[in-house]
Structures are given as structure tokens and as C-alpha cells.
Image: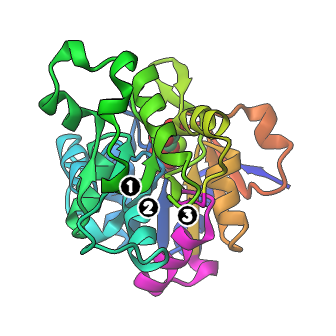
Amino acid sequence: MTVKLTTKEQINSLLDKYDTFLFDCDGVVWIGNELLPSVKETMELLQQHDKKLIFVSNNSTKSRNDYIHKLNNFGIFNINVDQIVNSAYSTATYIEKVLKLSKTDGKKIWVLGQSGITDELNNKGYQTMTFDDLTKKFPHDELTMDNIDNLIFKDEINCVVVGLDFNTNYLKVGITMQYLLDNNIPFIATNIDSTFPFKNTKLPGAGSIVEIVKFASNREPNAICGKPNNGMMDSILISNNLQKDKTLMIGDRINTDMKFGFNNQIDTLLVLTGIETEERALNEKIITYYTNKLGDIYDLSK
Ligand SMILES: O=C(O)[C@H](O)[C@H](O)COP(=O)(O)O
Ligand SMILES: [Mg+2]
């Protein structure tokens, strides 16, 4: 039975029970570039109680260092890069540790996505190619579908990664598709979120972009690296030596954040500032607690 957080006693029992808090970001900590209410105070409260804070985001548009800067800009400090796990980092880790893609074959990874993905791949020693790189090689009037044959470098690409790209266009998808027509080229998706919470609405998420590429290329991704993928959770649990019964996963989306916790026997807290509604919260057995916003942890503790 999902429990709604409404009292100071409930917050005190959360603080007693859990020593690690896993935070989803979009729709929980912030929406776009707006910090949600009482989040800064909540982080300070948890830090005062010596709790371990880990930020686990499916947003691949930023690198982990970008996340540190974003948190600092919101006045949230004393967070190091090891406390940030996003789908760009888990994708780069998957490619290095599981796919074991060569870094020395002189080839590049084609990325339909933003700098979060290329930064994390480059940090691991992989060369990447994006549409932005083509804009530096070709004049604008040659970046058209009529010139598609000259925009494809099949001998240079050994993998394709698709993630959230706010500047997705037909030609980018068309080029990505050409590489995936070769079934030997791995197709790696960063995450499957259908929507992206922004302002007071929802926009297409990475998962919607992956679906376009999947349908056009008639390929399923060889791997999906973000929540609720267990590989992401395993690396968090192992590298932080976490106890599952002392860990709480806080998120705004049931099919990623809540599944991520539930599938790994970790308690879950759903907040209603992102994708989901109270009605959905009340009808999902995989949710341990729910509340209106993350900042309720601070607001109710007073
Ligand atoms: O479309 C996406 O990639 C996701 O909506 C988004 O970025 C989710 O980020 P999270 O809520 O996991 O921080
Ligand atoms: Mg979210």
C-alpha cells in the first residue's frame, strides 16, 4: 500500500531508516533550469544527517561535471562527480566494460544526442562523430538529404548511440539510420523515457527519438543503459557499497525511477512534480511512499 508523506514523524522515520538517497533529477530536483521548492534545504538537511546523496538521471544531454556545475549554480554544494550517475555515463561505461568496443581501431562512435554523451565517451578515450562535426566539414547548402552519400562515413563508424537531442532533425535521423542498416554496428540507446518534463508541460523524451530510429532502421537497441536498467543500479550499489534496505530511490516516473528501485528491492518515493499523478501513485504497488514534492522532506521536518 503506497503511503503519502504528510507528517514530521514520517520524515523522522525516513531519516532513521535510510542512509542513502538516490535522486532522479528532471522532475524531482529541478524542471529544466528551475530548482524545485525547498530542494536546496532538503539537501542541506540530509547532508547535516550525514546521508549519502547520489543523483541518478536518465538525462544524457549533460556530462557528470555539467551536473556538478548545475547543482552548484542552484546552491547545492559538496557533491563530487562520483555521486552523479547519468545515462550518458552509464552508456559510456557499458560500451567500455560490457561491449568492450575498441578504442584503438581508428574508428568513431556516431552519436545522435548532445555533449553529455560525447563528453563521457571522450573521457573514456573514445572518438565520436556527430552532426555538429559535419557542420564543420561541409557548407550549409551541402548538409541536405540530396547529398546523403557524401555525409556517411561507414568505414569510420563502429557503433551508434542515440539519446536526447533537442535539435533532432530529419537528416540527423537519416544519417543515423544509414549506419544501423549494417546489423554489425551496435545500436546503443541511453534511455527509454517517452517524455521530458519541461516548464509546465511534457516534451518528447529520449525514448521517443529512439523509437523513430528503431522504426526507420528496423533495429532494436542492443542495449538500453539508463533506468530501469539493472546494470546502472549494480554499478551504483557496488561502487558505493550500499545496503539495499537502507537506500531510498526518489523519482517522478513510474516506468523508470520506481521500477529501478522496485526491481532491485529498494524502497521508492514518488514525487508529483514531474510526469506522474496522485491517481497513478495510488494504483502502483511498486511505490513505497509518495509526496507532492521532494522539498516536502524539509518542509514537513520543521
Ligand atoms: O528524455 C529524457 O532523456 C528524460 O526525460 C529525462 O532527461 C529524464 O531525466 P531524469 O528524470 O531521469 O533526471
Ligand atoms: Mg525524472
Tell me how the rendering is colored.
Answer: rainbow
CB atoms at circles 2 and 1 under 8 Å apart?
A: yes
Residues 274 and 128: in front is 128
Percent position of residue 276, x then y: 67, 34
- Quarter of the image with the N terminus is bottom right
- Residue pictured at 27% horizontal, 20% vertical: 143
Residues 36 and 122: in front is 122
Which corner quadrant of the image does residue 213 belong to? top right
| Residue 143: image tag | none
Question: The residue under label 3 is which amino acid type?
Answer: Asn
- Residue pictured at 58% horizontal, 78% vertical: 246
Mark-to-mark CA distance, 2 and 1: 5 Å
Q: Secondary structure at mark 2?
A: helix
Report which residue position mark 1 lands on: 88
The answer as to whether callout 2 falls within 8 Å of ligand 1 is no
- Residue pictured at 46% horizontal, 46% vertical: 179
Tag in front: 3 or 2: 2
Report which residue position mark 3 lands on: 12
| Residue 91: image tag | 2
Q: Is residue 198 left or right of residue 103?
A: right
Percent position of residue 35, x then y: 34, 34
- Residue pictured at 50% horizontal, 58% vertical: 185
In the rendered view, tell whether residue 140 sits above or below residue 138: above
Q: How many marks?
A: 3
Callout 1: few (<14), some (14-19), or many (20+) C-alpha neighbours within 10 Å?
many
Q: Is residue 240 magenta?
A: yes
Which residues lie in the magenta part?
222-246
Question: The residue under label 1 is which amino acid type?
Answer: Ala
In the rendered view, tell whether residue 148 sits above or below residue 146: below
Name the N-terminal-most of marks 3 and 1: 3
Question: The residue under label 2 is which amino acid type?
Answer: Thr
